[in-house]
Amino acid sequence: MKQQQGALTDIVDELEQASRNQDKVQVGHLIDALDHRGYGPALAVLPLIELTPIGGIPGFPTLLALTLASIVIRLLMGYEHFWAPQWVRRRHLDSDKVMTSLEWLKPVSLRIDAKLHERVKRFAGPTGRRAACIVILLLLLTVPPLELIPFATSGPMIVIAIFGLGLLYRDGLLMLLGFAGAAIAIAGGAWGLLAGGGSG
């Protein structure tokens, strides 16, 4: 839709505003910066942050998974606004690292905004959204154990970002791609954990 052109880039800009001119940024401030935009933007942008340099911080993928789980549960239950536990909201991230990650995301968001649009809307409707929520929660369950394997948490986060972009742009084709990607990510994560356990 026309009003969605620049949507993802605008969201990255808002996160930059929430992170600027301070040494540390609270996770809660980033959540609040996304809240008025809706669930699609949060599920599109937050998983992509895991792919940036900040995703390499030990424990960050699990913290991100917990944050996303609290958001997805609210979406599944039909609430209009986000919620996250206070102990998650109070966690601090280094502002410089957040800004570096958002600067890395900016050209990516510009390309995404130029390419995506509304397609096959029926797959991005209420039924598709509920199904996506359940699949996303399953993907998030794999993140903490996958932190033991270098770069393994990126697979689930990419799939979650695909779902978020599908919701943001009402792109049913992306939603279908998300379901296919989820099956691959879950199977790959299970194989990786079994292989890792067997080698130990």
Image (cartoon, helix red, strand yellow):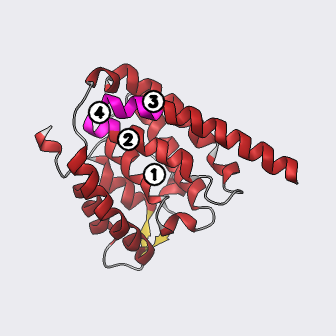
The CA span between labels 4 and 3 is 13 Å
Is the residue marked by circle 4 packed among few (<14), some (14-19), or many (20+) residues within 10 Å? many
The CA span between labels 3 and 1 is 15 Å
Which numbered dot is residue 171?
A: 4
Overall secondary structure of the magenta stretch?
Answer: helix
Under tag 2, what secondary structure? helix
Q: Which residues are magenta?
A: 166-178
Q: Residue at x 41, y 74 (%)?
A: 95
Marks 3 and 1 in Cβ contact (< 8 Å): no
From the image, state whether disc 4 or disc 3 is nearer to you: 4
List the residue tagged with mark 2.
164
Label located before the other in sequence (2 or 1): 1
Look at label 2 and name its amino acid: Gly
Q: Residue at x 41, y 28 (%)?
A: 176
Q: Is residue 60 above or below residue 141?
A: below
Q: Is residue 134 above or below residue 52?
A: above
Query: Residue 30 vs residue 63: left or right?
Result: left
Label located before the other in sequence (4 or 2): 2
Label located before the other in sequence (1 or 4): 1
The CA span between labels 2 and 1 is 9 Å
List the residue tagged with mark 1.
47
Under tag 1, what secondary structure? helix
Query: Residue 70 vs residue 194: left or right?
Result: left
Specify the quadrant that holds the N terminus: top left
Is the residue marked by circle 1 packed among few (<14), some (14-19), or many (20+) residues within 10 Å? many
